[in-house]
Amino acid sequence: MRPIEGFAVKELNVIPDDRGRLFEVLRRDDPLFSRFGQAYVTTTFPGVVKAWHRHRLQTDYFCCLVGMIKLVLHDDRPGSPSEGRTEQVWLGEHKPRLVVVPPGVWHGWTCTSDREAMILNLASEPYDHGAPDEERLAPHGTLPYDWQRRDG
């Protein structure tokens, strides 16, 4: 099955040495890079769902630096080759990844770790306080996704 059009996941290469670890998140010569607008960090407490929202213009580049999150995307863009698709991806300190969320795709996450998750976003557009490029929906019952944890 094809992924959501414009969605990408990049596994990050962790380089350890005697002092600690290093990993590059995104470079301007990376094929995934479009443009830079701003960088910000947000946190999410364990078990909390931060969803749903989407942007008309902005591409989000998420990297979870501390803790773990399950990031979910839903594409309801009319005419998109992936219209109706839902993707979920886990990322964080145990799975260092960069996730690209294209404009128009609903997205949100839940913190799946037992400590607060810290997420870096390298957004393609600066936040406009006067006219935010975002649309929001309630996290439960608005899109075809159940945030409930699935135990095995």
Image: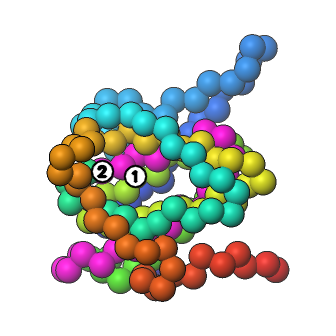
Q: Which mark is residue 59?
A: 2
Residue located beneath label 1 in the image: 100
Residue sitting at the far right: 152
On residue 132, the disc is none
14 is higher (above) or lower (below) than 147 = above
150 lies left or right of 56 = right
Q: Where is residue 22 shown, x and y percent of the image?
A: 62, 24
The verdict on residue 12 being magenta is: no
Up-down relation of residue 74 to residue 14 (above or below)? below
Q: Kindly identify the amino acid type of the residue bearing the numbered disc 1.
A: Val
Magenta region: 59-80
N-term-proximal mark, 1 vs 2: 2
The residue shown at (17%, 51%) is 131
Q: From where the camera sits, is residue 34 visible?
A: no
Picture quadrant where residue 101 is located: bottom left
Residue 39 can be seen in this image: yes
Q: Residues within 10 Å of mark 1 (few under 14, many from 20)?
A: many
Closer to the camera: disc 1 or disc 2?
2
